[in-house]
């Protein structure tokens, strides 16, 4: 594991000059805001279009970083210095991502320690630490997700050790770093309620049908701990009357259903079906929503319109998400075991990812991280893990749209698959070939074909000017098929009680 | 086998793979990892990026692609020589033509005649980087894998994998090819194919590959004394030798004939090719040559004593002195290991002592040195680290500091700790050298150089690489003594007839290090080593340590001519390797 840390860090250092998305400027701006403005203005300042829209703990984290940033290059801490990127700034920000990931490293070491310390756990820990998704999103595209996954893993490890209070507190902290973790909150809520707030009546061991009673004392303990975390985080802002600003920043309901590049979820398929139906509609003379014809493909953040299929409102997506989560949670409510908790956690996140409003493709990592922790539990787990990982990682490729990074993202993904998959299969004592069905195998090999098409084929066939949306749409739809298939498989196995 | 050391992380990883029956993934893993690191290095700037009007090596390579696809062969070596005129042999030109025509298929503007000069678009950069990557994957990497299979395949299951990883990840070649931008891996790959062929007995194939290597970059000549001696030994020490000799002769003639065929039509054009490829024919007094000699003059402090021409002659003598004994020894007793050490010896001797040394020529000795990484990990590590350190000013100028640090550390980490058997004196001496390197970097990073001496740190760097200088030669111990003896035209070679201990050797002459007190330029173990060490160390290790001590004393050396300092960086003497390669051949065997 140390060797992965050393080798990984050196490779991450090499990636410093890689393509940076606007998220780099976003975080620089936050450094500047938290450094140079009083707390009361953090959530009102809007010199840059990239306003602070993460919860307060993240703002404090940026404040902490800014104390070191001043040593590297004070100019990056000036709010008006928009798009400032001196070599020192780049190096500093990249280095902070690398250093903050030590939390993930530490969390994974604890994971190995408390999950059994077998070779298979070492592989999984290494696989998560050097996950291509993290390299793509954090170290090239630029974000701070690694240490957040670290906190998540820490929380899951505490849950495994049955320290549920600590687990809950860690999760509350996580929520106050980045509110996207609300996706998995329902699973935490149900599990903590069932496993922590109910105590067995007889002695200390609870049987499958053991009598249990509700403990108000525990509820109060847990509740006050979580409220305490929120108070520390939000308190100063509530005190200064900043709460409406803060909430308005965190939950901007003005964005469209799909992101510019469709995250490969249910709505991507829906939108693609709509595109296809346009042709049918033209042939059959159905009524069309003319305004929608050109909208999706140009794809800026805004309202998504459909030409044939009925329009989708935020409330619809919310309803579907909640229904799917309830199906998962009722199982957890009846059998609150740790394994069920981890599965429902993953599935709740998955439901939000698949059916949520304005989901970003990066959110797939929230599914892949908990899934990775249990990938070697059984052959089915491994099968789902392989399908979802390869598809999920591929769905992140469009984040790095410049050709320069293409060889890197391809080689890192292949390297990851070839180091992780055979080892895991071997640990389950299964021949590698028996894990996937032929259809699944061809689907995954097909990814290579799609990648070649988007890189080279499209320009050869259509030229670079026509049908520009097609490669992205193809990637999105192809991934959506695999991800939804993997999700269906996961759901089926989970509901059948096999996961 | 000393090369197997327990703390090596690569070996630990492989052991896991073996235990879980997934060793078959190992080659894929290190090939993909190698690719990842190469492409990550390729993100960084190349030589001459954004520096009009002349740009750098990248533009030279790009320009040759433009040149070769747009002009007839007869103009390749004459067209507008002021803008990166072609000065490599024909195979480079053919290779450029191949890359250029593929590139033009993708985007014809990349290699448009004249209008593409200095072109720096993202697409063309990616294409050029891919050209290096693909060439290396096709030629160099398979050669490395074959070499490891040939050399280590029959030993335990780990060795060939460890060897392959360490050779593939060697930072000097990686940075120069994928960072700085050159096609050295093609030339080195062809040479390595030749070595593979020689080691397995396919002499004719080996000769073809070696000719191709020479036909790609003339610098492969650095290897030629060893190759020549080895082949000659095969010809004249075997029964079928004469036939082999004829075969080899014809092969060489035919290969070169084909390579040069487009220019064979007229004497003028063939002479023009040769003039371009060997600029020494253009005269000894070009700036470049002169400054190399000035540099050497600083080192050796004979500047006041000799004229330039005398110095050139002196260098020839020195090169021959370094090359000839080992070559003779190789001829008399050819063996695969001796062949590899002889390759190190001859390429290193040329690198150090010949003129017209290109800045990056250290890659030539670095190839055979790296091949010996499992034999002599300590010495190879010192060599590669010193090579990297000496290239730092060049890399820094091109903005390659991050990959410099990352790849060097990565390789050192993969190499693991010292083998347990390493002697503490040797270990301490080397650690002092490393501490010097690290200290230099620290000062370079934190302290701005004084205004009057902007090159101060570059010079210090050279001076410290120069801590590698120390001579324990048959001519005398110590730099001054050796050179003074050389100047007095003394010969270090003596008759062995009356010397006890050498009766079993077939050679009747030899070059002995004179035994005696240091003040007279002679060698006494007790003056250089800790008490008792002389009994537990091999002779050549003792010499190495003595050389290191001298080097440290010598590092106080202070140059005073500003204009010469840049050049000094290139000329670095790697005492360990000279000593070890010579001694391995002469004494141990």
Image: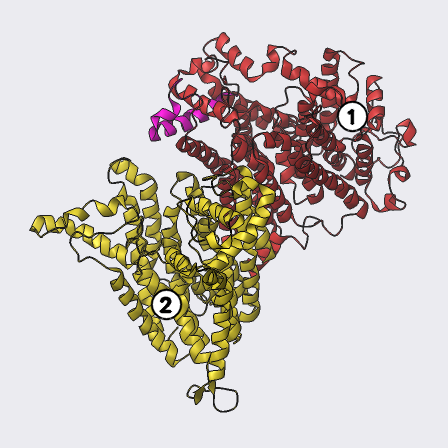
Chain colours: A yellow, B red
**Residue shown at 59% from the left, 42% from the top:** A72
x, y percent for residue B186: 51, 31
x, y percent for residue B110: 38, 26
Please state, as top left, top right, bottom left or bottom right, where the N terminus of chain A lies in the image. bottom right
Mark 2 packing: few (<14 Cα in 10 Å), some, or many (20+)? many
x, y percent for residue B197: 56, 36
**Residue shown at 33% from the left, 67% from the top:** A489
Q: Which mark is residue A348?
A: 2
Indicate yes or no whether the magenta region holds residue B102. Answer: yes
Left or right: B408 with respect to B89?
Answer: right
Q: Residue furthest left?
A: A285
Left or right: A331 with respect to B188?
Answer: left
Please state, as top left, top right, bottom left or bottom right, where the C terminus of chain A lies in the image. bottom left
Residue nearer the viewer, B557 or A29: A29
Mark 1 packing: few (<14 Cα in 10 Å), some, or many (20+)? few
Q: What chain does badge 1 belong to? A: B
Q: Which mark is residue B558?
A: 1
Q: Which mark is residue A252?
A: none
Q: Magenta residues?
A: B88-117
Residue nearer the viewer, A57 or B99: A57
Does dot 2 land on a helix, a strand or a loop?
helix
């Amino acid at each position: 594991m140390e060797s992965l840390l050393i080798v990984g860090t050196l490779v991450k250092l090499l990636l410093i000059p890689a393509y940076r998305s606007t998220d780099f400027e976003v975080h620089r701006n936050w450094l500047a805001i938290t450094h140079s403005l009083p707390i009361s203005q953090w959530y009102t300042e809007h010199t840059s279009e990239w306003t602070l829209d993460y919860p307060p703990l993240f703002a404090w984290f940026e404040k902490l970083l800014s104390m070191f940033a001043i040593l590297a290059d004070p100019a990056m801490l000036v709010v008006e210095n928009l798009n400032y990127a001196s070599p020192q700034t780049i190096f500093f920000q990249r280095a902070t991502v690398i250093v903050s990931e030590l939390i993930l490293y530490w969390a994974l070491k604890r994971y190995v320690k408390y999950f059994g310390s077998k070779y298979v756990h070492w592989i999984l820990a290494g696989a998560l630490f050097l996950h291509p998704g993290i390299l793509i999103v954090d170290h090239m595209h630029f974000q701070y997700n690694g240490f957040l996954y670290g906190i998540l893993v820490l929380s899951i490890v505490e849950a495994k050790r049955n320290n549920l209070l600590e687990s809950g507190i860690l999760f509350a902290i996580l929520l106050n770093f980045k509110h996207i973790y609300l996706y998995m909150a329902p699973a935490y809520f149900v599990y903590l309620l069932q496993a922590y707030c109910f105590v067995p009546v007889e002695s200390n061991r609870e049987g499958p049908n053991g009598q249990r009673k509700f403990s108000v004392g525990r509820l109060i303990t847990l509740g006050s701990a979580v409220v305490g975390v929120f108070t520390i985080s939000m308190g100063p802002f509530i005190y200064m009357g900043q709460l409406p600003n803060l909430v308005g920043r965190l939950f901007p309901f003005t964005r469209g259903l799909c992101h510019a590049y469709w995250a490969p979820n249910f709505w991507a398929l829906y939108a693609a079906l709509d595109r296809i139906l346009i042709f049918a509609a033209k042939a059959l003379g159905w009524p069309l929503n003319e305004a929608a014809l050109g909208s999706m493909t140009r794809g800026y953040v805004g309202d998504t319109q459909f030409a044939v299929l009925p329009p989708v409102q935020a409330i619809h997506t919310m309803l579907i998400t909640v229904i799917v989560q309830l199906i998962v949670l009722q199982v957890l409510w009846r059998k609150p075991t740790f394994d069920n908790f981890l599965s429902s956690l993953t599935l709740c996140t998955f439901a939000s990812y698949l059916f949520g409003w304005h989901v970003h493709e990066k959110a797939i990592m929230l599914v892949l991280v908990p899934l990775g922790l249990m990938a070697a539990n059984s052959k089915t787990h491994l099968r789902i893990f392989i399908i979802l990982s390869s598809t999920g990682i591929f769905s992140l490729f469009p984040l790095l749209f410049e050709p320069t990074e293409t060889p890197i993202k391809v080689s890192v993904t292949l390297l990851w698959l070839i180091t992780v998959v055979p080892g895991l299969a071997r640990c389950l004592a299964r021949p590698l070939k028996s894990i996937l069905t032929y259809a699944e195998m061809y689907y995954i090999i097909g990814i290579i074909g799609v990648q070649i098409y988007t890189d080279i084929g499209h320009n050869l066939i259509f030229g670079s000017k026509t049908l520009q949306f097609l490669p992205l749409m193809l990637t999105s739809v192809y991934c959506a098929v695999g991800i939804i298939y993997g999700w269906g498989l996961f759901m089926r196995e989970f509901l059948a009680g096999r996961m | 086998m000393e090369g197997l050391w327990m703390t090596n992380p690569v070996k630990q990883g492989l052991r896991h793979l073996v235990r879980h029956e997934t060793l078959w993934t190992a080659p894929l893993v290190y090939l993909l990892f190698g690719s990842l690191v190469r492409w990550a290095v390729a993100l960084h700037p190349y030589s001459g990026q954004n520096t009009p009007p002349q740009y750098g090596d990248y533009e030279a390579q790009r320009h040759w692609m433009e040149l070769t696809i747009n002009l007839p062969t007869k103009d390749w070596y004459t067209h507008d020589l002021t803008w990166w005129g072609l000065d490599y042999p024909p195979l480079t030109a053919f290779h450029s033509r191949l890359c250029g025509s593929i590139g033009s298929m993708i985007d014809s503007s990349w290699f448009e005649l004249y209008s593409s000069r200095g072109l720096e678009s993202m697409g063309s950069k990616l294409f050029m980087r891919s050209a290096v990557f693909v060439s290396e994957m096709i030629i160099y990497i398979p050669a490395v894998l074959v070499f490891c299979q040939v050399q280590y395949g029959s030993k335990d299951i780990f060795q060939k994998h460890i060897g392959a990883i360490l050779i593939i990840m060697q930072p000097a070649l990686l940075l120069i090819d994928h960072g700085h931008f050159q096609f050295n891996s093609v030339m080195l790959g062809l040479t390595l194919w030749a070595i593979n062929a020689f080691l397995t007995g396919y002499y004719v194939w080996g000769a073809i590959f070696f000719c191709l290597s020479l036909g790609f970059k003339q610098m492969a000549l650095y290897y030629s004394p060893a190759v020549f001696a080895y082949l000659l030994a095969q010809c004249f020490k075997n029964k079928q030798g004469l036939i082999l000799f004829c075969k080899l002769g014809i092969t060489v003639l035919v290969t070169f004939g084909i390579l040069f065929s487009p220019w064979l039509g007229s004497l003028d054009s063939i002479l023009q090719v040769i003039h371009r490829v060997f600029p020494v024919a253009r005269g000894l007094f070009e700036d470049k040559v002169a400054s190399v000699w000035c540099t050497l003059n600083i080192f050796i402090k004979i500047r006041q004593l000799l004229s330039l021409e005398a110095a050139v002659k002196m260098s020839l003598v020195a090169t021959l002195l370094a090359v000839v004994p080992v070559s003779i020894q190789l001829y008399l007793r050819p063996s695969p290991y001796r062949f590899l050490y002889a390759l190190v010896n001859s390429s290193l001797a040329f690198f150090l002592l010949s003129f017209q040394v290109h800045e990056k020529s250290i890659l030539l000795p670095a190839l055979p040195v790296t091949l010996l990484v499992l034999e002599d990990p300590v010495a190879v590590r010192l060599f590669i680290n010193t090579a990297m350190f000496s290239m730092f000013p060049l890399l820094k100028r091109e903005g390659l500091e991050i990959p410099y640090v990352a790849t060097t550390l990565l390789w050192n980490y993969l190499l693991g700790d010292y083998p347990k058997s390493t002697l503490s004196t040797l270990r301490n001496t080397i650690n002092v050298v490393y501490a010097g390197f690290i200290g230099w970097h620290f000062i370079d990073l934190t302290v701005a150089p004084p205004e009057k001496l902007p090159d101060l740190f570059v010079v210090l760097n050279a001076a410290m690489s120069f801590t590698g200088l120390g001579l324990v030669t048959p001519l005398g111990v110590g730099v001054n003594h050796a050179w003074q003896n050389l100047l007095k035209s003394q010969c270090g070679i003596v008759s062995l007839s009356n010397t006890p201990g050498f009766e079993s050797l077939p050679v009747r002459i030899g070059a002995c290090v004179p035994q005696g007190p240091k003040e007279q330029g002679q060698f006494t173990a007790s003056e250089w080593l800790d008490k008792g060490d002389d009994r537990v160390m091999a002779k050549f290790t003792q010499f190495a340590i003595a050389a290191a001590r001298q080097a440290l004393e010598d590092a106080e050396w202070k140059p005073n001519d500003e204009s010469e300092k840049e050049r000094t960086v290139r000329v670095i003497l790697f005492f360990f390797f000279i000593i070890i390669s010579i001694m391995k051949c002469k004494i141990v065997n």
